[in-house]
Image (cartoon, rainbow, N blue to C red):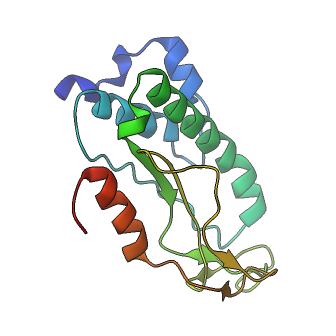
Amino acid sequence: VRDAFDIEKESKETRSRYGEGMESNGQEPWKWLLQARRLVEAGVSVVTACTYGWDTHRDNFPMLRHMVPSLDQAVHALITDLEDRGLLEDTVVMLGGEFGRTPRIGDITPDGRSHWPEAGFLWMAGGGIRTGQVIGQTDDRGERVIGRPIFAQNVYTSLYRVLGIDS
């Protein structure tokens, strides 16, 4: 596992595929996700790659235009690598936050968005989870949940199933 932390052992081509050199608001998602792949490959059963700097209360759109491409490239490289190495079926990749963003722009600053616990998102891939589906729905403005809300325990139940834990 110790060697898994040394991402310099990866080829320049691999590091580039993950987005090396694409700075994102002072963050380097390519490093976290490449290291996560290396840890999974080394047999680590649970890996968390935690990001920061996504509080776009000010300059929301310029910040996201700068931040999202590097995260998107790194996530794509992670999923592709896990699949190519035969690890995706046994690995769950989750991307999300603890809440969403206000459906209206300008609630704090003219170009910002505040925290919105009423609705958020969680993206999952791998682990034998049936993909290509949307579970849960909000109204047209993204303000309120329509139908049955999805709670953390629903997500944990899916994860427990993949980990072989009886929920």
Decide if residue 20 is in sight here: no
| Residue 24, image quadrant | top right
Compared to residue 12, the image places residue 55 above or below, namely below
Q: Nearer the viewer, residue 161 or 47?
A: 161
Q: Position of residue 21 (x, y in %)?
A: 58, 28
Q: Residue at x 50, y 66 (%)?
A: 97
Specify whether residue 64 is in view.
yes
Residue 23's place in the image compared with 156, above or below, is: above
Most extreme residue toward the left, as rendered? 2
Foreground: 119 or 165? Answer: 165
- Name above or below for residue 10 compared with residue 48: above
The quadrant in which residue 122 appears is: bottom right
Q: Residue at x 64, y 67 (%)?
A: 56
Image coordinates of residue 23 in percent, x first then y, are 59, 38
Question: Is residue 106 placed above or below 128 in the rendered structure?
Answer: below
Quadrant containing the C terminus is bottom left
Q: What residue is rendered at 51% in x and 77% in y?
A: 150
Q: Is residue 145 toward the left or the right of residue 81 in the image?
A: right
Query: Toward which corner of the image does residue 134 lie, by quadrant?
Result: bottom right
Q: Residue drawn at (42%, 21%), measured in percent from left and top?
A: 85
